[in-house]
Amino acid sequence: MKVNRLSVAAVLLSILVIQPVVAEEGTAEFNFLGSGSVSYKNITFDLPAVGASFEPSLITLGLHGTLSYGNFFTTINYDDTISDDTQYSNGGSLLLMSRQDADLSFGYYLGRGFSAFAGYKDGELNVDVIGEIENNMPVAPYAVVFTDKGPYVGASYTYAMTNSSLSFSLAYADMDGDVAFGTGATSGDTTGFSYNMAWNIPVGENTTFISKLNLTRYDFDDKEKGTVDGSNNPQDLSFEQEFNVLSFAIAHYF
């Protein structure tokens, strides 16, 4: 494998989880790349309006496939929890937390290490609440579900070195957000940025190892207000989401 081809492949991990790879610039042929990743995710969902905070630390497994033709590429990704997080809330309830993410993206390699991309993301954080709350009052098990769906756009840059490369990217998402609390629910807009840095190094003729750090900051703007607990009491559930993710992947050209 040519080193410059793998240098371009550093964009594989330059967005949310895995970002597409393209063949050598100007190569008019189809290429397929398959990859798998393991991610360590520290997530914070702080909801001051209801006095709740969810801070799962998760291990997830990602499967990814990229099809490219010339400088055009499309990628499909799926990432799911393989190690749930278990915590206790301040009120004494047991929290079982997991997350799933999927996205489809399309992009174009602009040359000189630059790529542009756009896609659609679907992410969901599940929190199962079990046990008792304050004053030892038992509660029936219920689920809290945070869902974000919508488009994103971004750009990446790859800096080629002698035997490896670094890539940097910035992406902006404008999604629909939903929150379900047992029998209550609310919805609004989720917007924000994702920042990424990845290091790419060849480990075989058609195989590369990639490590990536992702920092994502989203704001959820509650549009409905007052429906979370099933009552008519006005309640603004706007909150911030923070994701700090370290990923390791193996990618292989077929």
Image: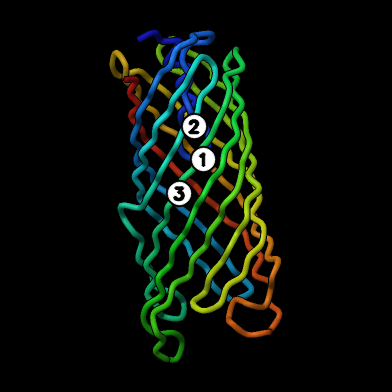
Residue drawn at x 63%, y 77% is 227
Measured in 3D between alpha carbons, the distance from the residue under mark 1 to the one under mark 3, in whole angstroms, is 10 Å
Say which of marks 1 and 3 sits in front. Answer: 3
CB contact under 8 Å: marks 1 and 3: yes
| Amino acid on which the number 1 mark rests in the picture | Leu
- Examine the image and state in which quarter residue 224 appears: bottom right
Residue drawn at x 48%, y 28% is 20
**Which of the image's four quarters has the C terminus?**
top left
| Residue assigned mark 2 | 19
In percent of width and height, residue 22 lies at 48, 19
Along the line of sight, the residue nearer the viewer: 63 or 210 = 63
Measured in 3D between alpha carbons, the distance from the residue under mark 1 to the one under mark 2, in whole angstroms, is 7 Å
Measured in 3D between alpha carbons, the distance from the residue under mark 2 to the one under mark 3, in whole angstroms, is 14 Å
In percent of width and height, residue 252 lies at 33, 23
CB contact under 8 Å: marks 1 and 2: yes
Whichever of callouts 1 and 3 sits on the residue coming sooner in the sequence is 1
Whichever of callouts 2 and 3 sits on the residue coming sooner in the sequence is 2
In percent of width and height, residue 96 lies at 37, 67
In percent of width and height, residue 246 lies at 43, 41
CB contact under 8 Å: marks 2 and 3: no
In the structure shown, which secondary structural element does the residue marked by tag 2 occupy?
loop
| Residue assigned mark 3 | 101
Along the line of sight, the residue nearer the viewer: 117 or 197 = 117
Residue 105 falls left or right of residue 97: right
217 w.r.t. 65: above or below:
below
| Amino acid on which the number 2 mark rests in the picture | Gln
Q: Residues within 10 Å of mark 1 (few under 14, many from 20)?
A: many
**Which of the image's four quarters has the N terminus?**
top left
| Amino acid on which the number 3 mark rests in the picture | Asp
In the structure shown, which secondary structural element does the residue marked by tag 3 occupy?
strand
Residue 16 disc label: 1
